[in-house]
């Protein structure tokens, strides 16, 4: 029962994520739920043309309203190194966010191919391990925890934009709306980095568990007890079946490694941006906390909490990357070389016996 509930939650969260990507113009592909694949819009179709035009329009409008968005922050007098760092942060994050949006918009085909490879691998691992779905409860927990931290960051950064002076004119209103839209898309892509590593780690973990279970099933072949002895034909039949399963596992592992590596290369710019953005925010918030604490300001606690949230974002990304690497190394710690060589010896022995 719990497994069904986790499956429903996982499907709901991933479908919600897919719809958000569509709404933020990061994807224009349609999801084929029957074959579990992303289908690009046909060349020359209205949806494809409108999607391209909308992305270009967003970038052009953002470039036009960017001075309006940054002027209040850049026009302040620089009185300390913290003010200088804050000004540089506004400039760099705005530029990097625009670059991130352009990379994602222009590289959608590459992103779609990687996602389809992930979806195909998901189905192959389900078939190999004879499971209906792969996502454990920790997937839902980590996913919701990450989005909780993301929403905390949203509220902290966008509540100041809701001041009346930011909506004094239509131009200012458009500037705020487009700025928020662009930033939502950027943060969405940054969170996709975390999600990709988490999914890869879960797939590696299931493959390792499947191989361990297969090794357990091979133990009766080695048994010499009277009640558990197998006939020569039965033993060789099982060895052939296990050899085929090991070959399939090796192919899946190779494909999973290639897909994970392709995902990392595709989003390495966003991963670096993710680390830079959170790190510089942590430094500025800790500076504000220390300054306000020395001035006995009660608002100092907010800066400390938000610095902790940014730190938690980095910790979760590092944890997922480490989890993926750790699970990918699991086959090296299993006695697969011994098992494979033993299977070869048994096969050679059976062939030589049949020759006599």
Image: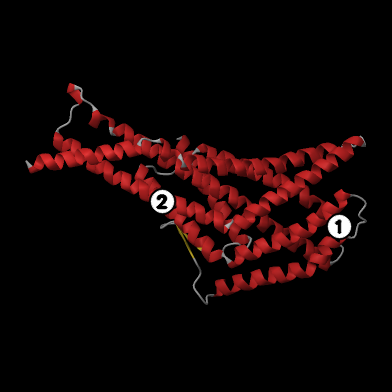
Q: Residue at point 39% right, 36% down?
A: 334
Q: Residue at point 65% right, 69% down?
A: 55
Q: Tell me residue 165's x, y (percent).
A: 88, 59
Residue 136, numbered label: none
Q: Which label lies toward us, 1 or 2?
A: 2
Q: Residue at point 91% right, 57% down?
A: 76
The quadrant the C terminus occupies is top left
Q: Residue at point 74% right, 63% down?
A: 178
Q: Residue beneath label 1, please?
A: 73
Q: How many marks?
A: 2
Q: Tell me residue 123's x, y (percent).
A: 40, 50
Viewer-closest of 146 and 204: 204
Q: Residue beneath label 2, please?
A: 254
Q: Is residue 139 left or right of residue 342?
A: right
Q: Tell me residue 32's x, y (percent).
A: 45, 60
Viewer-closest of 19 and 76: 76
Q: Is residue 304 above or below residue 26?
A: above
| Gap between marks 1 and 2 measured at Cα | 49 Å
């Amino acid at each position: 029962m719990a497994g069904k509930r986790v499956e429903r939650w996982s499907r709901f969260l991933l479908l919600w994520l897919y719809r958000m990507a569509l709404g933020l113009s990061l994807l224009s592909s349609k999801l084929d739920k029957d074959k579990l694949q992303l289908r690009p819009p046909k060349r020359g179709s209205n949806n494809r043309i409108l999607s391209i035009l909308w992305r270009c329009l967003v970038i052009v409008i953002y470039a036009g309203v960017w001075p309006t968005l940054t002027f209040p922050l850049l026009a302040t007098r620089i009185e300390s190194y913290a003010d200088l760092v804050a000004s540089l942060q506004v400039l760099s994050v705005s530029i990097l966010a625009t670059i991130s949006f352009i990379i994602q918009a222009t590289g959608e085909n590459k992103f779609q191919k990687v996602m389809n490879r992930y979806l195909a691998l998901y189905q192959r691992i389900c078939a190999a391990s004879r499971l209906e779905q792969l996502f454990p409860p920790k997937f839902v927990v980590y996913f919701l925890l990450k989005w909780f931290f993301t929403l905390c960051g949203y509220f902290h950064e966008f509540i100041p934009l809701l001041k009346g002076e930011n909506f004094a004119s239509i131009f200012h209103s458009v500037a705020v709306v487009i700025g928020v839209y662009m930033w939502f898309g950027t943060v969405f892509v940054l969170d996709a980095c975390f999600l990709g590593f988490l999914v890869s780690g879960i797939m590696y973990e299931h493959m390792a568990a499947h191989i361990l279970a297969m090794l357990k099933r091979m133990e009766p072949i080695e048994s010499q007890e009277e009640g558990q002895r197998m006939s020569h034909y039965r033993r060789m039949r099982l060895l052939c079946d296990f050899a085929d399963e090991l070959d399939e596992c090796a192919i899946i592992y190779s494909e999973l490694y290639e897909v994970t590596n392709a995902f990392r290369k595709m989003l390495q710019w966003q991963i670096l941006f993710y680390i830079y953005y959170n790190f510089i925010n942590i430094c500025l918030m800790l500076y504000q906390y220390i300054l306000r604490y020395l001035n006995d300001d009660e608002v100092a606690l907010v800066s400390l909490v938000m610095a902790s949230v940014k730190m938690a974002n980095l910790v979760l990304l590092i944890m997922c990357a480490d989890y993926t690497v750790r699970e990918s190394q699991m086959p090296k710690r299993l006695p697969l070389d011994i098992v494979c060589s033993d299977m070869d010896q048994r096969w050679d022995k059976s062939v030589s016996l049949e020759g006599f």
